[in-house]
Image (spheres, rainbow, N blue to C red):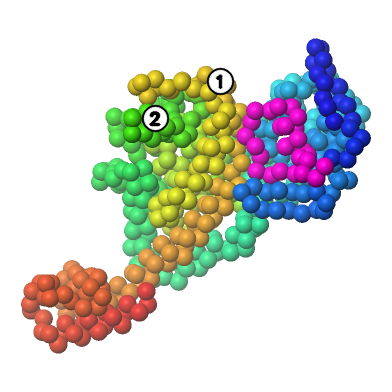
Amino acid sequence: MSITKFANGEMLLSKNTSSPPNGSVIGLHWLIKELGLRIPIPAVRSEIAGSRRTIAGEGILEQYPRQYAPKDLIGHIRFALRYEPVFLDVFKAAFKSLDSQTIEKWVRHEPTGIFARKAWYLYEGLTGNILNVPDLKVSTFVDLLDPRSHVVGPSTQVKRQRVNDNLLGDFRYSPIVRRTASLEQFRTLDLSGRSKELVESVDPVALARAINYLYTAETRSSYAIEGETPSPDRAERFVAALQNAGQFNSNRKQSYVELQNVIVDQRYAQSDWRSNQNYVGSLRRNFDQYVHYVSPKPADVPELMDGWMNMGSRLESMRAIDPVCAAATESFGFVYIHPFEDGNGRIHRFLVHHVLAKLGFSPTGVIFPISAAMLRDPGRYVNVLDIVSKSIRPFIQFTLDDDGHMTVTNETADLYRYLDVTAHAEYLYWCIDQTIQKDLREELDFLGFFDEALKATINVVDMPDGKASLLVKLIHQNGGRLSKTKRALFSELTDAEISQIEEAIRKASARI
């Protein structure tokens, strides 16, 4: 099939009656190829093959028998809306390249057709152009996104096309989270229930000490990811922010400004979104910059952030939303927009805790030290961030002067509006699973051991708590024996008493 575009913009679709060969792309990938769209390639690709199969690799390859092959452009749009995830960036680029008559003729021909109505709604919402088609008066409402293949947002009835808009956000900003086998497997683990059960099994006094440690550990790790060590004052302020993460007003611009002021050096505190172009780069040996990621243009940030905050408000008000998918969508969306000069990464990770607390996923008053999991495997974290960075980088044109000042010279806002954050949600689930299995459980187990060892030590010799705690620490760190170099610190104890305490501590350590 070929497409001819006349001077008046009308599309002529020429049907090709021959069967497409195996390997021929269909749906969204066909639109990108045939219309010459310069946009990131979707992670899901559909193609013609001998039988129906799904092949998972770096992306998802969906193979369909020949009878599925569309015959024309409208057929490929219909196929995409019926069988593929709704990648809004592809539809927007495709619709902008088509004359409105192409979609209008389809809608007039099938005014009550499910996929014509979805295309109609998407066309008007994504392009801002209203088709010369009357409102649909009689028909049942249809979901825009199929909940079986998408994580969906709250549903809003749109009477004109009689469509239920269940996007995560709106047309200013709305990422996609595809339902995958990995996400479904994580959901069956009931990580929220497991963490709450674990917390409830701990003595309240020990739990209070554990919580204090977890907040401190999360703060240190979050700064360490940025290669920073916070001053005691800044660390204390960030801990206080984390402790109130569930009450954070995420739908208010000033909340983010105030939070940014709390966590950065006061010389870099801001009163508004950034006004400069920022990027993530690294210096080469000749001091040239290698650019890894380019943030949105400063002029695009206000609208993107308005759309992003609207999305967050929608998700946080939806009881049925998967809390981890919501946290991934909000937090990674924030860091890709990068609305501040400094502090974006720490706010990004703060937002994970905010959403998990707001939606009741994490135990009340308890924080998952997710940054510790990220810090243990930094390559995995970088790889997840690179999914978007590498996909949009070829479509951004910029200049970089000798002082490192960047200017983006083309329109790029749409590259950030409709991100696929499926892998980010899978990654966040992995981080939470790691923190429950390792950080949370290990800290609670350690406190149980320490309390038991301290009690056993004092039962042998009734010494001050501070000295007993030091003795437990030194014996435990040295594999169950007090080293000769530290023996003088406890000269008042007999060798027999030391031996008895060592045995008690070794016995207590068996629990960790």
Please give the range of residues in magenta.
Answer: 21-48
Residue 45 position (above or below residue 449): above
Q: Residue pushed farthest bottom?
A: 496
Label annotation for residue 49: none
Label annotation for residue 289: 2
Callout 2, which amino acid? Gln
Residue 181 lies in quadrant:
bottom right
Give the image location of residue 79, x and y in percent.
81, 40
Q: Residue pushed farthest top?
A: 7
Q: Is 175 on the left or on the right of 114, as rendered?
A: left
Q: In which quarter of the image is the C terminus?
A: bottom left
Q: Is 193 on the left or on the right of 370, as rendered?
A: right
Residue 27 among magenta residues: yes
Q: Which callout, 2 or 1, points to the residue nearer the camera? A: 2
Label annotation for residue 410: 1
Task: Find the distance from the CA under tag 2 to the CA under tag 1.
Answer: 20 Å
Q: In which quarter of the image is the N terminus?
A: top right
Return the residue nearer the eye: 396 or 428. 396
Give the image location of residue 492, x and y in percent.
7, 79
Return the residue nearer the eye: 132 or 208. 132
